[in-house]
Amino acid sequence: MMTVATIPISHTPADMTQWTGRAEPFETARARYWYQLAQPYEQQHIGLVGFACDQGVRRNQGRVGARAAPPLIRRAFAALPVIAELQQRFDGQLSSLLGDAGDIHCDDNDGFADSSLEQAQLKYANAVSAIVKQGGLPIGLGGGHAVAYGSFLGLWQALENTNNANVTPTIGIINFDAHLDIRQSDVATSGTPFRQIAEHLDAHDQPFHYYCIGVSRFSNTAALFDRAEQLGVQVISDEDCHYEPWNTLAKQVKSFIDQVDIVYLTIDMDCLPSSIVPGVSAPAAFGIELGFVERMVKLIMASGKVKMADIAEINPTFDIDSRSCKVAARLLATIVKQHLIIT
């Protein structure tokens, strides 16, 4: 692979100018929007961390541009109203709900930059770990799905450093994705994160619990399905999401959650149809319904076991009327609401 010199990776603090929205001077104080509550991160219940990097997508031969997504997802989310249920529950404490921990930037100069992705993942992992150790829920905003390895590392570091009983909690990964992302490669890419996680866990004598929802048989080679079987990956296909009864699928996911102590939830936005989310690195011809994803996210969050979440692969270059960012913002709002309700 052609490489250029290793580049510096920056962590920029929260840019609060991204948090804007409409004013409601003639409404009551209950006309609140998320832009009015967000603060720079200081131990709030939830901390947003941007992963402004698509070097992994470039290495994986995908459509680049995802590094521009984090601020645009924030802006779409900022304009959403804070639902009445949260205002009632946290009356007087609304400023404690949401913090912005800024962005990790990987400026690869539109080329293959040696070690740039790996450095960005480590720096992002440090930001994630700090939030977990302070008792917050980190939510990553990608960026390419290479964010997943960084998210896992951040969670792992926090658990490793705060575990007094010398017993590592069992981590379960639930990924909404058209792709398994367990490719073999000589470098890390957006298609390798869950294989890397499997190897990391194996090196630490820990089991690999991975559930992938929305997998397309037309988007993964036979070799990938073979590897999934070898690794014990559990799969719900995109076709199953459409044709199998909800109760059957919900029971399977609940059973998976019951087997683990902690859940890492990741949503690759290419699991949704390209007609709903056109702005992604690898658009889906079929995909799974937004209503299904949202309903399943609520079920997963209701377990109380989710300690890390992220949303990946939004690519603003190919978006239409900010449609993709708005869908990402709705799913972000769903995760935020569900976490705060059970806090």
Image (cartoon, grey):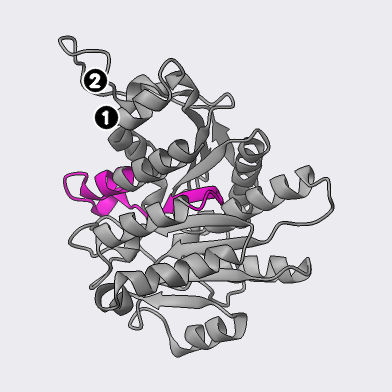
- In the rendering, which numbered label is found on residue 307? none
List x then y, in percent, for residue 280.
31, 58
**Relative to 26, 55 lies left or right:** right
Q: Within the magenta stretch, is there residue 309?
A: yes
Residue 257: quadrant of the picture: bottom right
| Disc 1: CA contacts within 10 A as few (<14), some (14-19) or many (>=20) | some
Q: Within the magenta stretch, is there residue 181?
A: no
Q: Amino acid at mark 1?
A: Pro
Q: Are marks 1 and 2 in contact (CB under 8 Å)?
A: yes
The first of marks 1 and 2 along the sequence is: 2
List x then y, in percent, for residue 158.
70, 45
Residue in front for this viewpoint, 307 or 12: 307
**Relative to 207, 149 lies left or right:** left
Q: Residue at x 32, y 54 (%)?
A: 294
Placement of 95 over or under 155, stated as above or below: above
Residue receiving disc 2: 31
Furthest-top residue in this view: 25
Placement of 299 over or under 16, stated as above or below: below
First to last magenta residue range: 303-329
Residue in front for this viewpoint, 124 or 232: 232
Residue receiving disc 1: 81
